[in-house]
Image: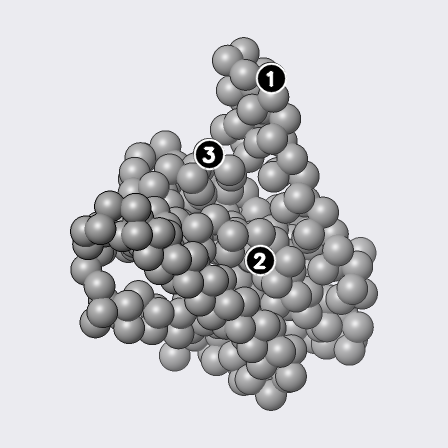
Amino acid sequence: MTPVHTLVAKELRCFFVSPIVYVVGAVFLGIFGLLSYWAVVEASNQALRMMQMTDTFAQININDLVFRKVFYNLNLVLMLVLPLLTMRLFAEERKLRTFELLLTSPIGINEIVTAKFLSVVIIYCILLTLTALVPMVLSAYVSFDWHPVFTGYLALLLQGAFMLAIGLVASALTENQIIAAFLSFGVILLLWLLGAFGSTLGDTPIGHVFSYISFIEHYDRLVRGLVHVKDLIYYLSGMALMWFAAHQVVDAHRWN
């Protein structure tokens, strides 16, 4: 096994012996279930109203009425939940005084940062996989287009991985897990507000810059089933930038 594989396995063991991953997982899956249930109930009520008005069988768009709403609302949930997953990555190592031992081991900083990031992404992917039960169950009762569902999950994966990368940097900056969580949430909230501010500025150069820096438009296009290269580049470059920032923070701590 490579050092990255060894560190990832160690991090996953730490996650699964800690109650935080079960609490976060239960909250995330519970909220996803409630959002899906409310969206399905609202879509059913709308279909009934249309049938009463037209006296014919009503065709409703499940993608628009259910999945798109769930994906949009889940984006706000990720802003609150994912910082709780990343807050312990480096902060706990520094608090337990094992951070120096990790840095003096024959493992490069590249491997350490990569393993920390991959471990939390794997946890997040497991949670996303469990949510796939909802569209699979719905497909047994109603037909819908799977393409927007797949792109919606791609949006959740990229959006979540980007937020986790931000949390990775926040955790590397402090030994206090609560501060790390709030710092991560603050940066994510700032990116969200930049998108809202860019929309307010409208069709102006600075408005376009703010809109691109924010994840709102990129996430929105993917949820609507539109896969653009510029959106993929945004998320991948954002994750790379956060990985580099975390690397620099850890490297600076080694020389202190």
Q: Residue at x 76, y 66 (%)?
A: 177
Residue 153 vertical position relative to residue 213 in the rendered view, above or below: below
Task: Depth check: give the residue in front, 114 or 149.
Answer: 149
Under tag 1, what secondary structure?
A: helix
Q: Quadrant of residue 196?
A: top right
Pointer 1 residue: 201
Q: Which amino acid lies under the numbered mark 1 shown in the image of this protein?
A: Leu
**Could you tell which of marks 3 and 2 lies nearer the N-terminus?**
2
Q: CA distance from mark 3 to mark 2?
A: 17 Å
CA distance for labels 2 and 1: 26 Å
Mark 1: few/some/many CA within 10 Å (<14, 14-19, 20+):
some
Q: Which residue is mark 3?
A: 217
Quick check: 252 above or below 241? Answer: below
Secondary structure beneath disc 3?
Answer: helix
Q: Is residue 224 left or right of residue 127?
A: left
Badges 3 and 2: C-beta atoms under 8 Å apart?
no
